[in-house]
Image (cartoon, helix red, strand yellow):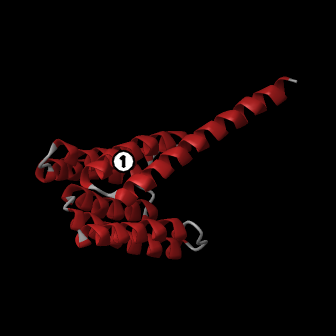
């Protein structure tokens, strides 16, 4: 039971660092906090025995860093497809273990597109991670994914209302 509680504390620190990173203005600071947060998240999944989630977080860390450092997002995503397949094939001990792989694949693709597709992809990504986190016992992961899903739905709703209001104003 102590390991489970410690895992949840590590998950809370990971998500806290991620959220804190968004308040930084310097991209290097943002990345630094996110990398440190990812280390806590990797430790969190390790202690929960959620190895496919752990491996996917490592891949996402490398992928997102590559997206940031280059202008070849789509090419990087295509190059990573065999890696996603490899991870899915070799880390899948239960059907639920494929969820973080599928989520990351969807997220990786969505991040190479325009805002609306990225947000819709994020909702799907977060929903799959939510199910996986329920399965592996990541309480903080469940809470965080619910917050991200609600936030992204709000963003879509707000953008839709802005467009709708703009059309009304333009027609007057």
How many numbered discs sit on the rendered protein? Answer: 1
Residue at 26% over, 63% down: 45
Quadrant into which the N terminus falls = bottom left
Q: Look at the picture and state if 7 lies above or below 152.
A: below
Q: Inspect this view and state whether residue 109 appears.
A: no
Depth check: 139 or 130 in front? 139
Q: Inspect this view and state whether residue 74 appears.
A: yes
Residue at 37% over, 49% down: 108
Snapshot quadrant of residue 68? bottom left
Depth check: 68 or 31 in front? 31
Q: Is residue 102 rendered to the left or right of residue 155?
A: left
Crowd band around label 1 with a 10 angstrom C-alpha radius: few (<14), some (14–19), many (20+): many
What element does badge 1 sit on?
Answer: helix
Depth check: 157 or 167 in front? 157
Q: Is residue 104 rendered to the left or right of residue 122?
A: left
**Residue located beneath label 1 in the image:** 130
* Percent of width and height locating residue 78: 30, 47
* Percent of width and height locating residue 149: 48, 45
Depth check: 70 or 54 in front? 54
Quadrant into which the C terminus falls = top right
* Percent of width and height locating residue 167: 76, 28
Q: Is residue 59 rendered to the left or right of residue 35?
A: left
| Residue ranking furthest to the top | 171
| Residue ranking furthest to the front | 1
* Percent of width and height locating residue 42: 29, 67
């Amino acid at each position: 039971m102590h390991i489970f509680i410690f895992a949840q504390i590590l998950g809370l620190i990971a998500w806290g660092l991620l959220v804190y990173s968004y308040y930084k203005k310097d991209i290097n600071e943002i990345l630094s906090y996110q990398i440190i947060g990812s280390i806590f998240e990797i430790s969190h999944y390790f202690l929960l025995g959620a190895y496919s989630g752990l491996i996917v977080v490592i891949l996402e860390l490398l992928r997102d860093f590559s997206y940031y450092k280059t202008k070849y997002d789509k090419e990087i995503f295509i190059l990573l497809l065999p890696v996603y397949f490899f991870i899915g094939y070799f880390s899948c001990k239960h059907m639920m273990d494929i969820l973080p792989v599928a989520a990351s694949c969807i997220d990786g693709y969505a991040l190479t597109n325009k805002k609306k597709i990225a947000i819709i992809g994020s909702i799907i990504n977060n929903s799959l991670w939510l199910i996986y986190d329920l399965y592996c016992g990541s309480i903080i992961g469940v809470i965080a994914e619910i917050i991200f899903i609600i936030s992204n739905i709000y963003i879509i709703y707000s953008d839709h209302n802005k467009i709708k209001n703009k059309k009304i104003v333009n027609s007057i």
